Image: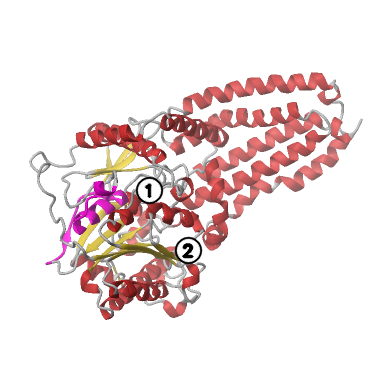
Amino acid sequence: MGFGRRLLSASYVWFTVLLLAKMALLRYLCFGEVAWTRLGSDAAAVAVLTSLTALVLPGRGQTAAYWLLNAVVSTILFASTIYFAHFGSMPIYTALLELNQVPQVQASVQSTMDPMFYLFFADLPVLALLGLLLRRGSRTVSDYSPSYRRGLAAVALVACAGIAAAGIRQGLAIDNELAAAEKQGFLGYQVIAAIKAGRESRMASAADLSQTVGEIKSLQAAYPYRAPGRAAAAPAHSGEAKGMNLIVLQLEAFQNFPIHLKIGGQEVTPVLNELADGAYYFPRVYQQIGQGNTSDAEFMSNTSIYPTAKIAMSTGYGDRALPSLPRLLQRSGYKAYTFHVNDVKFWDRNRLYPALNFDRYFDKPYYNNDHFNDFGASDEELYRFGIEELAKTSEEGTPFYAQFVTASSHFPFKVPADRQRLQVPEGLQDTQLGDYLIAVNYTDYAIGQLIEGLRSKGMWENTVLAVYGDHYGLQPDDNDPAWVSEALGIKYDSRVSRLNIPFIVRVPNQQGGVRVERTGGQLDMMPTIANLLGVKPGDAGIVPFGQDLLNVDRNIVGSRYYLPTGSFFNDEVLYMPGTGFDDGTAISLATLEPVKDLSPYRGDYDYIMKLMGLSDRYVRLLPKR
């Protein structure tokens, strides 16, 4: 009898056990524990794979198929663990569509690697040795007839599929993605994600766009964003910058805590400090990005639509004619441009920008590469070129909207020595926090160069400048909140402070700065800017899911990627669900301390879940271009 036939049943057992061990390893690396009581879900799912292999390939090719299955699953778990370490979220199968992005952020990926991740491949030499030993093995079930062996495989497949299906049914009721992944295991979570995606797709295909818009407006009208006496009043600050140019700076990995922070007597962000003191400054704004990260921030700030968190919006919805800020301003004669030093194909921006209807985009080939970091050109070069282009439009008498997406403060925050301007204390040197502050300080300096360039071209006094961060910078696993708090002399929370980003809007000739304490998110930026420019989103068919932060008395913003689905910030707390609402947690935004009584926030939870669901349906129904 050949080696493959004798090893058949042994292969089934060994590879099933081996893959289960790797599922346990993923649990340990991602969730900090193995949770043995939950390995039953992993065992059932793994046994489905190996039983299906045994059923489909009962002959000599079975062992080779097990080796291939092992290699594929190992690679997926390895990549998923890296993804989790970098983003703090468990990836679903749609993340495979973004694998082409990895070479662009190679330094970021390498910096999150842990040698333990390679344990997913440690079995290769062990299995080779085991194969040699098993050549001397005794009689096994593989000596039985092929039909008998297929029968055993079929019985195992049906039994394990039934167990896995029961767990998946339970997991479908859990909106918290991390809770579902931890409870049902990696493979079960992928099935849950696929089933939910199928349900949402069927619901969207059966829906009507105009009907959905009506549901959105009805739901939003029922939420008390405005006090009764203010609801019918004309918007405050409307048209303060009517007809002016607009520049929006999306700052890479820029959190809010460096604003007005001093290190060793040095201001970390002197330019932004001065800007904030004379502008509308919103210190309680939070990131809401999904799987597309930076590109999702661009999507939100221009559309005021929630990312689905199932796929990068540039990839999944770049074929749509998106209602957007460029389209709104083009109705008033504006030209809309976007500037980024990276290749426009990164995050499928070559699809996103036409979907948003920018008139032109300027990507990597337009800049002199001064080799600042892995992306190439520095923020200074980005702004230098941008000013030259905008000056041409300004000289024609045409107003413009220009979006700049910066990259100099990208993780892992390595600024060339000759560009460093901030001297961090010895205790922060060669730490991620110290590197981050140096990178943020450089980003701030470059903004100063942009302002000077606008002044020299005579554009500064006719230009609204909006600045915001796309997402957090400090990696939670590398920056203990207690240490950050002690090192900086501030109170830092790994969730609230980490997701808190700056939003500043400077209007020329503004009489003094205004600090707006209203809670907000990236969805709120477009409606707020539109009001200042005196344009109405509805005129361009825009249905905003965010609010004008200068004209609400209460606000709520949802989040569902770096936080579990159902999480939200309102004016009081950050709330995060568990397996449902009742076992969730809340943190006070004012004190950064836990809040025990969750009952006041049940209505906000129900509202934000409905609103995000309608947003998903709405974007799916938008016409293709």
Front-most of residues 432 and 357: 357
Give the residue at x 70% y 40%: 70
Residue at image mark 1 = 322
Residue 212 is left or right of residue 5, and the answer is left
- The kind of residue tagged 1 is Leu
Q: Secondary structure at mark 1?
A: loop
- Is the C-beta separation of discs 2 and 1 under 8 Å? no
Is residue 155 part of the magenta span, yes or no? no
Residue at image mark 2 = 412
Q: Which residues are magenta?
A: 511-540
Residue 478: image location, x then y, percent: 45, 57
Residue 265 visible somewhere in the drawing: no
Residue 82: image location, x then y, percent: 55, 51
Front-most of residues 322 and 595: 322
Say which label, 2 or 1, has the lower sequence index. 1
Label 2 and label 1: CA atoms lie apart by 33 Å
Give the residue at x 37% y 67%: 440
Residue 436: image location, x then y, percent: 40, 65
